[in-house]
Image (cartoon, grey):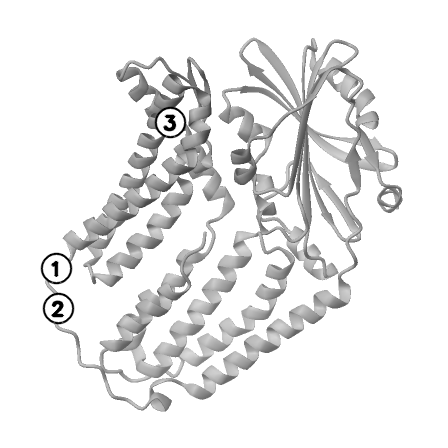
Amino acid sequence: MGGPPFWPLFLFKLRWDDRPAPSVPLQGAIWIAAALALLVPPTRWLQEAAPERAICAWSFALAVAGIALSLMALAGGTSWLRWFSFPLAFILTAVPWPHSMELMLSNSLMHGTAGATVEILCLIGIPALQAGNLVHIETGVIDIDEACSGIRSLQAMVMLSLFLGELFRLKPARRLWLMVAGLAVTILANVIRTVVLASLGAHQGMNAVDRYHDTAGLCVLVVSLSVTLLIAYRLRSSKAPMLAPQSLPLRWALPVPWCTALLVWFLATEIAVETWYQAHEPKWQGWSWAIQWPKQDKQFQFLDIPARSKRLLMCDESQAATWRDADGGFWSLYLIRWNPGNLQAESAKVHRPDVCLNAEGAVMEHDFGTHVSTVGAMPIPFHSYSFRMGEDRLYVFFCLREEQPGEIAGTAIPEFEGTGMFQRALRGRRHVGEQSLEIAMSGYRSEQSAQEAFQARLGQLLKVRADAAARAGR
């Protein structure tokens, strides 16, 4: 999540203009600032290796906010520490939420939005049926994705409500009420959006859904922000008289020597971190394997991945195809890649079969765990599942492969905040690429028959780069 970078500075300026008189400086605050400053180099070192990890961003932001608060305590004691705590802590609203938290909220919002949409459509006379995060209408299927569910709108609304609460100097209870009201307005607006899109799809065809999708999203944003601003304006109380600004020499008010030392420390940290990675980072040699599409098979066809889905995935490359195998089984293959340096690569860990297929109405019957398949001399781990989707049983094989320059690492079910970032940093590896491979098969009697067919065909579908296979074999 992002936000206007000047918002915290603006709020700090508002507080500075009517700041209270400083109390006795807290001399011990400098030791807290020094301790937090010592955390900055290792945090930046890890963040450079894994910029997509929320834990790195949060650690760095908390350290910076803590240092700023310590300087305020050193300059103006507890009086300034309390007074400036909100604008300095406000920078935390710009830090991305942990992916596990986003995933939980997204799933709940998508399922809830789909359910509410179906209920409203039925009330207004449009037949609809919910299947996971899908809304089935007579003319087609509407997928309630993360964008439609409003997760990004909720993140923006948290930031906006906190900003407006401070701007209008609302009391704590009113600030909380403003946030709750803003979140409720956002959720309601997104439900109305999906109802309108579904209604258009039912009367004008599914092309109308794609045609008005982005416009409806913009309307939700404008309406949500406008209503929240109106609520904040109505909640404001009569303006309290501002305290007269204290005309203190800036050299006394702010601990300039300590500020200068910290700036030098931050600069030295950036230079040291960049030097470390420049000295260890090898040249990117490309992906370790590629897909050999079976264009000669029956009913082979490439699938068009909608632009909306690509924006949701935030990937650099996506390909998909379906075909019927010689034994009569129906196969689907999806390849998605996030190039090295793409900070959205962490989203690859969210788009997994146990998440996405469940969202489409499939029911997971079995999780068969991870097994390793060898292609050429390269071991590739796959996680396999079986799903029930209507009358069909799907056998799904999934691998998410993390590739770094000069390194190969694959895992079928990666951890969100694991120890991989320490290993990357120690080896001086950054700009990690991710590629996701998912193969879904139907028409097989059992997991064993599907597994046998998968193992027999995998070597024909994947072409491993020779030098990558050699490194993997060592």
Give how far across and how far down residue 176 sits, in percent. Answer: 24, 51
Mark positioned earlier in the residue sequence (2 or 3): 3
Give how far across and how far down residue 253 sits, in percent. Answer: 33, 86
Q: Would you say 304 lies left or right of 112 here?
A: right
Q: What's under tag 2, amino acid-wise?
A: Ala
Q: Of residues 283 and 82, which is closer to you in this image?
A: 283
Q: Which residue is mark 3?
A: 197
The answer to whether the residues at label 2 and label 3 have Cβ atoms under 8 Å apart is: no
Q: What's under tag 1, amino acid-wise?
A: Ser
Q: Secondary structure at mark 3?
A: helix
Tell me if residue 294 comes above or below residue 449 in the rendering: below
Tell me if residue 250 comes above or below residue 381 in the rendering: below
Q: Which residue is mark 1?
A: 237
Q: Secondary structure at mark 1?
A: loop
Determine which of the numbered discs, if any, sits on residue 278 in the image: none
The answer to whether the residues at label 1 and label 2 have Cβ atoms under 8 Å apart is: yes
Mark positioned earlier in the residue sequence (1 or 3): 3
Cα separation, mark 1 vs mark 3, equals 39 Å
Q: Of residues 437 and 418, which is closer to you in this image?
A: 437
Q: Residue at x 56, y 78 (%)?
A: 265
**Taking the image as drawn, is residue 172 in sight?**
yes
